[in-house]
Image (cartoon, helix red, strand yellow):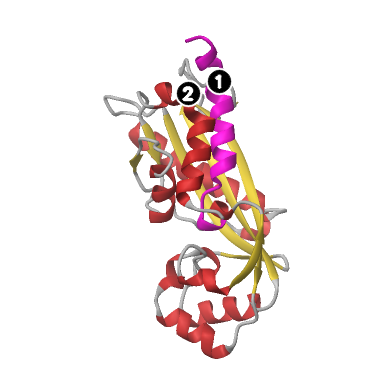
Amino acid sequence: MCSLSAARSGSVTMLQPIMHVLNVQRIILASGSPRRMQILQNIGLQFEAVPSTFEENLDKSLFPHPSDYVKENARLKALEVANKLAGDQIVPDLVIGADTVVAMDNTIYEKPKSRDDAINMLTGFSGRSHTVYTGIALVSPLQSSVITSGEVTEDGKFRLNLFHEATDVMMTDLTEEVVKMYIDTGEPMDKAGGYGIQAIGGTLVKGIRGDYFNVMGFPLHSFSRTLASLYQSQHSQT
């Protein structure tokens, strides 16, 4: 059974060798998502939430795959916040950007723009499988002695590590009544694809293949594995 407490146990184990380093770093989550904050809080990570003001208006048609689209959104969110805080007395050691979308039949679905939009999304997902993609961007100062790998940004100020996770979700058959009553709860309107697997929307999901937390909006295992790898050299020196 998957739960936040179970995830905390596993991820703390994965990050435990570097937790003494992480705990003295200034870590920023460039998002105001309650789900993302909850996931990171439950693994014991100390961070500040500074939501990005980047306007998510990229032309989806310019990206060959949804994974490219979410990674670019995550990159721009993280860099916007990193640049905004670069003049602080204590410069962030790590800025985490994230972006999540749902994709099906070559169409990318973000948060519903209206009730009708939510109805159309959920009706289209009924009885079918779709994929949830989350892009993660990890931005650190170029002069960091802890993270020494990653792409150097064009302005020469930061190192950037990008990755994504994909999870397949099978939705049960949904009647018009169920769709409308679910939307009446208000839950779908701030969630990519128009549903939240961690709450009432979980009753609509027949099954998943992949990371459950990715469907919530943050790929916990991939994040922990990547972070452990990036910080491993520092751990080996201490």
Q: Is residue 19 above or below residue 97?
A: above
For the point 60% across and 58% down, the residue is 59
* Residue 88 image point, x, y percent: 29, 29
- Provide the residue span drawn in magenta: 215-238
For the point 52% across and 46% down, the residue is 74
Q: CA distance from mark 1 to mark 2?
A: 7 Å
Mark 2 sits on what residue?
18
90 relative position to 201: left or right: left
Whichever of callouts 1 and 2 sits on the residue coming sooner in the sequence is 2
Which residue in the rendered view is the most extreme toward the bottom?
177
66 relative position to 34: left or right: right
Task: Tell which of 215 and 65 is nearer to you.
Answer: 215
Q: Find out whether residue 24 is within the magenta segment.
A: no
Q: Is residue 125 above or below residue 93?
A: below
Mark 1 sits on what residue?
232
* Residue 66 image point, x, y percent: 66, 55
For the point 50% across and 53% down, the residue is 3
